[in-house]
Image (cartoon, helix red, strand yellow):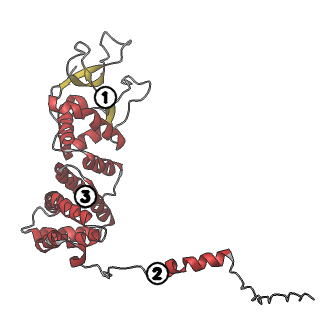
Amino acid sequence: MPKKALPKPTKKRSAAKPTASPSKALAVRRAPVATAKRKTSGKLAVTPTQVFPTATASYAVSHPDAVPFLLLFGTVGVALSVAATLALDTLRPAARAFGARLESAFAPDAKTPEEAARVLRVKIESSPNAQRATLEGVRRLLDSIAREAAEPLADLTAEYASGDKPVDGFFRGAARLLADLTPEEFAALRAILGRTCREDVILGRAEVSLLYRPRNDDRDGPAHFTFSRPLAEDDPRRPGTKGEWADLGPLEAHHTQHVLHVVQLLKLNALANDPRVGGFAATSGPENFVVAATVWRRLAALLGSPLVARKKNG
């Protein structure tokens, strides 16, 4: 009889191991990354030797008054700290001129700078209006583009601080204007005031309308400043014509390219306005502006262009 084939022995299956959920498996795979320690340079404290390169550190030694700025900007980056030191060098002459002018305005009889500074400190500390005016003046000095702005800003600050006057629209507008002017625009504004701040233009008027354009009889020639003035009662052109544009002459050629931007800054800082619609001088455009006579005279005084005596026209 054939032998029956014996059944092959079967391997005993082991119990299946429980598999982790996808999220847990992902967490396991990510674990080494999540728990890896970030390498650090070990520089936890900010010190001058850690923040600054050799050149900047040597500058700090020779300019101790710049150290606070260097420490502040050095935490952000070396390039910014170097820029800050250069800014300090640029600002230092203007700051000295501003301080000297302010001290002389508050203490004209002081025998020494220390005495003048002491009088200035007492005045500022005793008056909230003086504190506000001085703070605003210094802030605009820091923002200023032209070195020439330092003395007018100091005179403006002294006018309000020494007189205990609250900061008003004129102060804010004039300070912003002075800070925004480039040296070339500063010179152009002085020239504009010298040309237009005249007795025959200002006196007896609450406001003045000024126009800067070529003359009608010379359209290709240089632009002239003109101002509007009413006609006399017995003028034969009345009543059909109520006023006329009186010529004030052109500016020097090197100022002309800056005039329109200076006029725009006057308007932006609420020191001048566009002409009213329907008025005699309602010629619209960037070259036309209306300014209060008192504002014009105060600006002229700040910039060293006092009222010019001229023979009255008409």
Q: CA distance from mark 3 to mark 1?
A: 30 Å
Circle on res. 287: 1
Q: CA distance from mark 1 to mark 2?
A: 68 Å
Q: Secondary structure at mark 1?
A: loop
| Tag 2: amino acid | Ala
Q: Is residue 109 above or below residue 54?
A: above
Q: Where does the image place residue 82, in percent across and percent down from the top left?
A: 21, 64
Q: Quadrant of residue 5?
A: bottom right
N-term-proximal mark, 3 vs 2: 2
Q: Where does the image place residue 262, in percent across and percent down from the top left?
A: 27, 38
Q: Secondary structure at mark 2?
A: loop
Q: Which residue is mark 3?
A: 142
Tell me, yes or no, if residue 118 can be seen here.
no
Q: Where does the image place residue 263, in percent across and percent down from the top left?
A: 29, 36
Circle 1 packing at 10 Å, graded few (<14), some (14-19), many (20+), is: some
Q: Residue at x 25, y 60 (%)?
A: 138
Q: Residue at x 76, y 89 (%)?
A: 11
Q: Residue furthest front?
A: 1
N-term-proximal mark, 3 vs 1: 3
> Number of numbered discs present?
3
Most foreground residue, 91 or 4: 4
Tell me, yes or no, if residue 277 can be seen here.
yes
Circle 3 packing at 10 Å, graded few (<14), some (14-19), many (20+), is: some
Q: Residue furthest top?
A: 236
Q: Where does the image place residue 294, in percent across and percent down from the top left?
A: 28, 40
Quarter holding the N terminus is bottom right
Circle on res. 36: 2
Most foreground residue, 255 or 10: 10
Q: Is residue 115 above or below residue 303?
A: below
